[in-house]
Image (tube, rainbow, N blue to C red):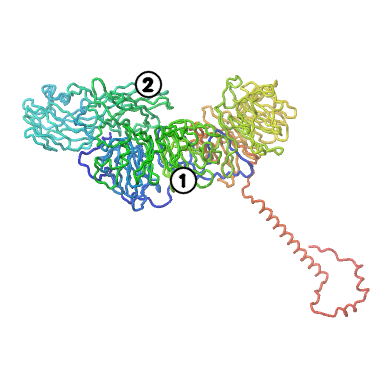
């Protein structure tokens, strides 16, 4: 059991360090190196160069390639848990430090000597990265280490890091050292009380004005902190339910039981007295199941038969400390003190003596040792223990005693309904109640009502204490609770309590649930607090806990109203000086009950905003820190302001308002921007349809590689309101405004990131950090994305529809195609006859070029500036397309399809002429067996289109499961005989061999999950080794270029997923850890690689298998696309979706199907040409050289003599040759050809 927080009553000192260690400068210092790093994921090395255009189709709103190990598909937390976040190089968010609650505020702490101390983070958390850390901690961005700044108990709402004074100013609703709600952390000294010891109410914001003064804003009316009641020691600690033991008790009947003296108030006599054995020292001990901090001990001495206790000592357990007391000596009437031998008078006129604890120490057990006695032995006739803490416990045994001897008129109580059981305290301060609730969760599932003993009216802070979930292993089932209550008899004198809180804290915490007036308990009114589960939670099972509620009386100087200006370095603060501050005077003009929620300083001006009114301003006002002048900002806003973010001359404001107070600017709708240079208000679009709670700055790359500042808004809204040409956008309480575009991120048709969730605060700069809980993707794209060197968008706005359903009896059926498909399920590229059409099918809607809505099948014509068209109203809008194939100019589209085309009903399959973009005569419709199509394939070089699915006939032809449509004759035919069942996938393994997967019967007798069809012989047979396949095949793909091996996936009878490859007549399961429950594989495809992996028995070293769908990987979670290299599975693509869910990828579709042709090692064409030219020149040179060589050899054989090189008389020479000799050689034959 953990003991209560220790408080000392000693005088306050200027500097205190109530933490077990003091951080030194070297400890705080952050080395000036690059901060948070992320581990790159191994590259996929998939070769896409031979495939033409590539796209990923699915049901998603955002998509990312898996590039860093911190990426995931997990939804953002909705149970109150947030994290410190950073951006990975690809733009996705990653958790750096996890918490069990909210990070409310952060600041980068640079000390006066320039040393970077780290980032101070504050909130209502109790743990960081699983380490106990209450409310505030220091984060080292270089090492990612977290150092708890122990000493505070409660919640931190605001921090301000001030380099000039080497100080972090901290505000919230907490206690620490001798301060309440405000304290300072000074450089290397640690926690330091401010000279005013805090405020009598919570602090919500802190800023530094241009004059160097620190401005505190909140819900306070004066300086001050917790104080003792005017009548101290008024709460009686319940001894009646303690485990009481004693040592050396008397054996005399009526005097031996140590419990005799509880609730007896010194009555004395048999049954009311406890005695020791004669002449023997002894002890009296009480052990409790809750912790407490006593302030006074009352002892009643016994006078039974001349006996009595002379000296005693009090030991606090389990700390085993002997306590110091002060008391009034009844003989002299003077103050006295004692420790180990405290005296007790035996004067019969002295009914009892009170001993006051010098130190207020937490304990859950104590022992009173009697060391000396009067007469024959010691003893007591009564004992009582008192404290100042006002608690109402969920377990009534811990509340004030109800026995008559206690004399309490209105004791603290708790009443409850529901399946409550007592839970051991473990690491908590006391045992508590736990209720295990089953859904649906309502307010009536369980309840507990706390009724405290308030002895005097006054200003109180009310705190709800919640035990941590780690100790009882209930973190996954903790949820939200609803707190209600009324604190005054006159409802107009106080605000009713109405709070929603999370119980997901890892360690013990308390939340301030009320701050204000409370009436004393009376016969006509008692303050009460009711705690119930928050209704309509999505938890299937909820763990609901209840421990205690504390009430602290607050002392106050008064004179303030939500604003306080503090001059750093001040040693003494006088309430009489309040009026000297312009900020204090401004707060004094606010109406009673006002609150300052947020502060922001820009240049010389500090902006003050919240929930306040005065004669001149409302809810927001500006104050110049240098000349103390105020500016009304058009009179303020007509509703409460919750949050502000300042960026340059733009002040972004969020809350609940509609216009400026003077109505000069309307339709602000809860979020607006104020131009501080032009003094002009402007809306953000048309605002949002609900309250904005947080406005937080972000940076994003919108139109270039340079990041720009954008603004996120969080709150209780469900829609970004329509404005201009932008329609309303449904959201989950989150939007991002892009100032450079004058629009919401959700409206931009740009390659930008997709972000959803909660951002509570941020630090922008070189090392930008965020706090919150978000899901993000590197590309915002609905349903389809292009794949190349990077992900890209298609110029079409897909809007996913709900899963198809219909009252049409043709749609309510059992079929092979899942009825839960949404988004884009299938795609194809049509490049026949010079066309450039991208075809998308599924269950969605888009907007055509003429503004009409296109449902479920889109034609994106690249030759006509990406004109969008569809099939029109002749196909029912609740259809779902899951299979596409193109034969010539005709598109075959199948799925759960119904409609009326050219006056005739269609079912499961439609055909559409892509050249004329019109319907032609439709094939006779499919019917029976659910009438759905799951797969379509064209037999190469023929007019045959094979259609597989769940149907019984095609027109009048009996053709169960699979049928052939001949485009030349426009007739259906049955492939072979004796085929029955449901087909989920068909592929061509070779030009003449078709493979069909599903739940099949062939030759009317043989059941199988995989069959093959010989198109030449028109016969069916089981696929070799198909009996080894453990369940119906859902998807399949060829595993080799010759079709000799295939991959299949499906579901076993126990619901688990299998993945297998054929190897001759044997089937080999995929190696590595099995895929986990919840896996849904919708597509398989072999890809070639640019870089080989290690050789494995199941897959070639230059290939990988890509799985698409929603695949649950052990130790990782879901991934929408996964690559398998023969040994393990690795994520390839991740998606997010609307509704805070992961998305899925149905298929990869490509322009060309050259999956087994790798470009690995090939050179660019220009180099090939140059190399070929070089080789040609080299060959020509060799031929020329060979010619020279052969010519020389011939001449040598013919007796060739080189001509002389000296000059001679050519004229005289010619005269020496007779003419007949010169010409006679022409008639002679030449020597034979040279042979080598």
Horizontal side of residue 911 vs 701, given as left or right: right
Q: Earlier in the sequence, mark 2 or mark 1?
A: 1
Question: Would residue 1067 be visible to someone looking at this image?
Answer: no
Mark 1 surroundings: few (<14), some (14-19) or many (≥20) residues within 10 A: some
Q: CA distance from mark 2 to mark 1?
A: 47 Å
Horizontal side of residue 311 vs 965, given as left or right: left
Q: Give the labeled residue for mark 2.
A: 444
The image position of residue 627, as x and y in percent, is 34, 45
Q: Give the labeled residue for mark 1.
A: 38
Give the position of the C terminus as an image quadrant: bottom right
Examine the image and state in which quarter residue 787 appears: top right
Secondary element type, mark 2: loop
The image position of residue 435, as x and y in percent, is 35, 25
Residue 461 circle label = none
Horizontal side of residue 109 vs 821, given as left or right: left
- The residue furthest right is 1220
Residue drawn at (37%, 21%), measured in percent from left and top? 444
Question: Would residue 732 be visible to someone looking at this image?
Answer: yes
Name the one closer to the observer, 783 or 1234.
783
Name the one closer to the observer, 1170 or 668.
668
Examine the image and state in which quarter residue 202 appears: top left
Secondary element type, mark 1: loop
Q: Is residue 1088 above or below residue 894?
A: below
Give the position of the N terminus as an image quadrant: top left
Name the one closer to the observer, 760 or 810.
760
The image position of residue 1004, as x and y in percent, is 65, 23
Horizontal side of residue 699 vs 579, given as left or right: right
Examine the image and state in which quarter residue 192 appears: top left
Name the one closer to the observer, 898 or 452.
452
The image position of residue 617, as x and y in percent, is 37, 35
């Amino acid at each position: 059991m953990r003991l209560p927080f220790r408080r000392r009553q000693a005088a306050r000192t200027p500097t205190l360090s109530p933490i077990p260690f003091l951080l030194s400068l070297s400890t705080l210092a952050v080395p000036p190196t690059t901060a948070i790093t992320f581990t790159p994921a191994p590259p996929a090395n998939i070769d896409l160069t031979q495939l033409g255009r590539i796209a990923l189709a699915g049901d998603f709103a955002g998509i990312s390639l898996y590039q860093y190990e911190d990426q995931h598909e997990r939804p953002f937390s909705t149970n109150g848990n947030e994290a410190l976040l950073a951006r990975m190089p690809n733009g996705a968010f990653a958790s750096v430090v996890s918490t069990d609650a909210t990070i409310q505020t952060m600041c980068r702490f640079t000390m006066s000597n320039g040393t970077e101390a780290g980032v101070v983070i504050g909130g209502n958390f109790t743990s960081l990265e699983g380490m106990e850390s209450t409310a505030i901690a220091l984060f080292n961005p270089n090492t990612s280490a977290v150092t708890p700044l122990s000493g505070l108990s409660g919640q931190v709402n605001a921090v301000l890091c001030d380099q000039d004074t080497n100080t972090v100013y901290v505000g919230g609703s907490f206690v620490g050292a001798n301060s309440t709600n405000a304290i300072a952390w000074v450089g290397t000294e640690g926690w330091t009380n401010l000279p005013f010891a805090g405020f009598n109410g919570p602090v919500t914001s802190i800023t530094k004005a241009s004059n160097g003064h620190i401005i505190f804003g909140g819900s306070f009316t004066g300086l001050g902190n917790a104080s003792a009641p005017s009548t101290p020691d008024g709460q009686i600690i319940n001894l009646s339910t303690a485990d009481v033991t004693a040592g050396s008790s008397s054996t005399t009947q009526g005097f031996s039981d140590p419990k005799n003296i509880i609730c007896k108030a010194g009555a004395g006599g048999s049954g009311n007295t406890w005695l020791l054995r004669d002449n023997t020292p002894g002890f009296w001990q009480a052990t409790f199941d809750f912790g407490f901090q006593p302030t006074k001990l009352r002892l009643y001495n016994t006078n039974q038969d001349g006996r009595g206790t002379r000296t005693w000592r009090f030991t606090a357990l389990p700390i085993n400390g002997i306590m110091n007391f002060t008391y009034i000596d009844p003989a002299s009437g003077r103050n006295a003190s004692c420790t180990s031998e405290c005296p007790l008078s035996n004067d019969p006129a002295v009914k009892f003596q009170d001993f006051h604890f010098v130190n207020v120490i937490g304990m859950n057990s104590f022992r009173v040792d009697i060391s000396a006695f009067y007469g024959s032995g010691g003893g007591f006739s009564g004992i009582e223990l008192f404290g100042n803490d006002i608690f109402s416990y969920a377990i009534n045994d811990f509340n004030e005693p109800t026995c008559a001897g206690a004399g309490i008129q209105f004791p603290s109580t708790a009443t409850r309904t529901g399946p409550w059981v007592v839970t051991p305290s473990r690491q908590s301060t006391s045992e508590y109640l736990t209720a295990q609730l089953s859904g649906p969760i309502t307010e009536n599932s369980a309840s507990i009502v706390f009724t405290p003993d308030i002895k005097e009216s006054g200003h109180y802070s009310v705190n709800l204490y919640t035990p941590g979930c780690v100790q009882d292993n209930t973190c996954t089932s903790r949820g939200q609770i609803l707190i209600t209550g009324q604190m005054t008899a006159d409802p107009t004198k106080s605000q009713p309590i109405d709070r929603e809180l999370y119980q997901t804290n890892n360690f013990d915490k308390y939340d301030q649930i009320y701050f204000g007036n409370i009436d004393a308990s009376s016969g006509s009114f008692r303050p009460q607090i009711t705690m119930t589960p928050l209704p309509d939670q999505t938890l299937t099972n909820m763990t609901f806990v209840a421990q205690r509620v504390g009430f602290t009386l607050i002392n106050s100087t008064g004179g303030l109203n939500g604003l306080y200006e503090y001059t750093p370095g001040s040693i003494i603060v006088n309430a009489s000086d309040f009026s000297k501050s312009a900020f204090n005077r401004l707060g004094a003009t606010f109406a009673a009950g006002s609150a300052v929620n947020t502060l922001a300083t820009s240049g010389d001006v500090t902006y003050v905003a919240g929930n306040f009114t005065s004669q001149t301003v409302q809810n927001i006002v500006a104050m110049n820190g240098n000349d103390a002048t105020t500016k009304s900002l058009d009179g303020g806003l007509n509703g409460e302001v919750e949050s502000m973010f300042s960026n340059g001359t733009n002040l972004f404001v969020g809350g609940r308002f509609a216009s400026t107070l003077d109505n000069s600017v309307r339709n602000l709708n809860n979020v607006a921007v104020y131009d501080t240079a032009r003094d002009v208000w402007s809306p953000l679009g048309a605002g949002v349809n609900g309250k904005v709670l947080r406005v937080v700055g972000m940076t994003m790359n919108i139109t270039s590689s340079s990041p720009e500042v954008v603004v996120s808004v969080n709150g209780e809204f469900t829609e970004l309101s329509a404005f201009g040409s932008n329609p309303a956008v449904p959201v989950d309480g989150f939007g991002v405004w892009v100032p450079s575009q004058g629009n919401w991120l959700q409206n931009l048709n740009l390659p930008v990131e997709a972000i959803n969730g909660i951002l509570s605060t941020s630090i922008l700069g070189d090392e930008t950090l965020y706090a919150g809980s978000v899901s993000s993707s590197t590309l915002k794209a609905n349903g389809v994305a292009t794949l190349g060197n990077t992900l890209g968008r298609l110029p079409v706005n897909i809007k996913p529809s709900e899963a198809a359903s219909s009252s049409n009896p043709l749609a309510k059926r059992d079929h092979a195609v899942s009825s839960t498909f949404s988004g884009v399920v299938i795609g194809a590229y049509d490049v026949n006859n010079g066309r450039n059409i991208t075809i998308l099918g599924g269950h969605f809607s888009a907007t055509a070029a003429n503004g009409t809505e296109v449902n479920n099948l889109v034609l994106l014509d690249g030759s006509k500036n990406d004109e969008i068209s569809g099939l029109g109203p002749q196909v029912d809008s609740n259809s779902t397309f899951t299979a596409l194939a193109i034969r010539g100019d005709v598109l075959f589209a199948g799925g759960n399809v119904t409609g009326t085309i050219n006056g005739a009903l269609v079912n499961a399959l439609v055909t559409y002429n892509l050249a004329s973009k019109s319907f032609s005569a439709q094939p006779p419709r499919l019917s029976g067996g659910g009438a759905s199509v799951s797969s379509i394939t064209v037999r190469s070089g023929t007019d045959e289109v094979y259609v597989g699915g769940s149907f019984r006939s095609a027109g009048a032809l009996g053709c169960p499961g699979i049928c052939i449509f001949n485009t030349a004759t426009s007739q259906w035919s049955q492939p072979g005989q004796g085929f029955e069942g449901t087909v989920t996938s068909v592929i061509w393994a070779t030009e003449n061999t078709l493979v069909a997967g599903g739940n099949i019967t062939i030759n009317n007798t043989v059941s199988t999950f995989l069959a093959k069809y010989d198109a030449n012989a028109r016969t069916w047979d089981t696929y070799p080794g198909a009996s080894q396949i453990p369940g119906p095949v859902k998807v399949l793909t060829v595993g080799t270029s010759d079709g000799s091996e295939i991959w299949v996936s499906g579901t076993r009878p126990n619901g688990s997923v299998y993945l297998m490859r054929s190897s001759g007549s044997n089937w080999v399961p995929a190696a590595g850890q099995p895929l986990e429950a919840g896996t849904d594989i919708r597509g398989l495809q072999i890809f070639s690689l640019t870089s080989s992996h290690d050789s494995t028995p199941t897959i070639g070293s230059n290939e990988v298998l890509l799985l698409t769908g929603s695949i649950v990987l052990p130790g990782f979670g879901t991934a929408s696309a996964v690559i398998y290299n023969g040994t393990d599975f690795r994520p390839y693509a991740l998606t997010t979706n609307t509704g805070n869910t992961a998305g899925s990828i149905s298929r990869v579709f490509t322009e060309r199907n050259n999956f087994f042709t790798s470009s690995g090692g090939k050179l660019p064409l220009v180099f090939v040409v140059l190399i070929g030219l070089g080789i040609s020149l080299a060959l020509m040179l060799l031929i020329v050289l060979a010619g020279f060589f052969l010519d020389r050899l011939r001449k040598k054989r013919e007796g060739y003599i080189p001509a002389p090189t000296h000059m001679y008389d050519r004229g005289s020479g010619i005269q020496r040759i007779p003419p007949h000799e010169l010409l006679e050689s022409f008639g002679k034959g030449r020597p034979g050809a040279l042979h080598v």
